[in-house]
Amino acid sequence: MQQGCVNFVFMGIKRKTKSVTTVLNIFEASHDAKSVVSLITLVKNEMNKTTVYRILDRLEQDGLIHSFNGKDGLKWYAKCNGCTSHKHFDTHPHFQCTKCDKVECLTVDISIPNIKNHNIETADILLMGQCEACCS
Amino acid sequence: MQQGCVNFVFMGIKRKTKSVTTVLNIFEASHDAKSVVSLITLVKNEMNKTTVYRILDRLEQDGLIHSFNGKDGLKWYAKCNGCTSHKHFDTHPHFQCTKCDKVECLTVDISIPNIKNHNIETADILLMGQCEACCS
DNA sequence: CTACTTTCGCAACTCAGTTGCATTAATGAT
DNA sequence: ATCATTAATGCAACTGAGTTGCGAAAGTAG
């Protein structure tokens, strides 16, 4: 018998704790992506790093946020417009600034060609260069 | 005054040691990408892991191989056709199989759109799915 | 062969991410 | 409101990729 939080479709999150709310609020506040490392620093007075990792896992399971690797191989998370549904299907590209490291979700569509004898399911696309602030 | 190895344009590699030859031969033998982890295992009887990291660094400086992050954030290297020159300009996509983890350099061109107020310099594109062997 | 300098091996380290377990707290049931 | 259940948390210890410093080994020019 399932209990609570019926709005979380995949039941990654089953109890809405203070920590979960804190993390969710951060993602609501800005749609910019955040590295796990920066998130841990951001909430270090409120919760343990293990908790951060586990909450991010669960939020991703529920399709509320999505993850990808930044240019240094570190893990980043973001809540983009496409993240509202559990039908989260993600080929949208990300942009990371090579000067300030900021990461943005891009709304442009990049078409993935078919590759002979390969079954393509997803794509991670990371564009790199200078962001608006660092361009000028 | 520069010495030796005049064919290495950026002088990452200055001395052709046994270890360098070993690593280069691996990349010559197959154009499939290799993770650093697998390379270290492959040559563990011949050299130290620190040496592997340093040789890969130098070979990349010289444009003989190129690097990128795999789906788990681990570093991979490959020698593709485009790697022959020091004018190595790399937007070619990679493919990683979600079943067997194998990575291939793809020769298809994926066009990167311009992003408003952003200066795009490079792109890491990783397609994922099933490779030829794992499709059937 | 010698001198110079790159490269290597080793050991110790950093840091992201994980795991196990005991404790805490959110939730449904009473 | 209280109780029982079990998800979620904190902590400490761990794993594993990648890095660093330094003394020793080995290429290369002369």
Image (cartoon, coloured by chain):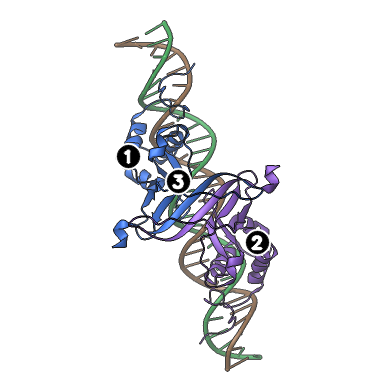
Chain colours: A blue, B purple, C green, D brown
> In 3D space, how far apart are the residues under numbered discs 2 and 3 (Cα atoms)?
29 Å
Q: Nearer the viewer, mark 2 or mark 3?
A: 3
Identify which residue, A22 or A45, lies in the foreground.
Answer: A22
- Of badges 3 and 1, the one in the foreground is 3
Q: Amino acid at mark 2?
A: His
Three-letter code, disc 1: Ile
Tell me the residue that label 2 is attached to.
Answer: B31
Task: Tell me which numbered mark, 3 or 1, is placed earlier along the sequence.
Answer: 1
Q: Position of residue A28 (x, y in %)?
A: 32, 37
Q: Chain of mark 1?
A: A
Q: Residue at x 63, y 76 (%)?
A: B16
x and y, in percent, of residue A82 in the image: 41, 38
Q: Residues within 10 Å of mark 3 (few under 14, many from 20)?
A: some
Whether residue B126 sits left or right of residue D7 in the image: it is: right
Q: Which residue is mark 1?
A: A26
* Amino acid tagged 3: His
Cα–Cα gap, marks 2 and 1:
43 Å
Please state the horizontal and vertical placement of residue B73, each as a whole percent of the image: 51, 51
Which labelled disc corresponds to residue A92?
3
Circles 3, 1 touching at the beta carbon (< 8 Å): no
Q: Nearer the viewer, mark 2 or mark 1?
A: 2
Foreground residue among A14 and D27: A14
Nearer to us in this view, A90 or B52: A90
Q: Split into 4 quadrants, where in the image is the C terminus of chain B?
A: top right
Q: Tell me the residue at 51%/66% (across/down).
A: B89
Q: Are marks 2 and 1 in contact (CB under 8 Å)?
A: no
Which residue appears at 43% of the width and 38% of the height? Answer: A56
Give the label on residue B80, or none.
none
* Mark 1 element type: helix
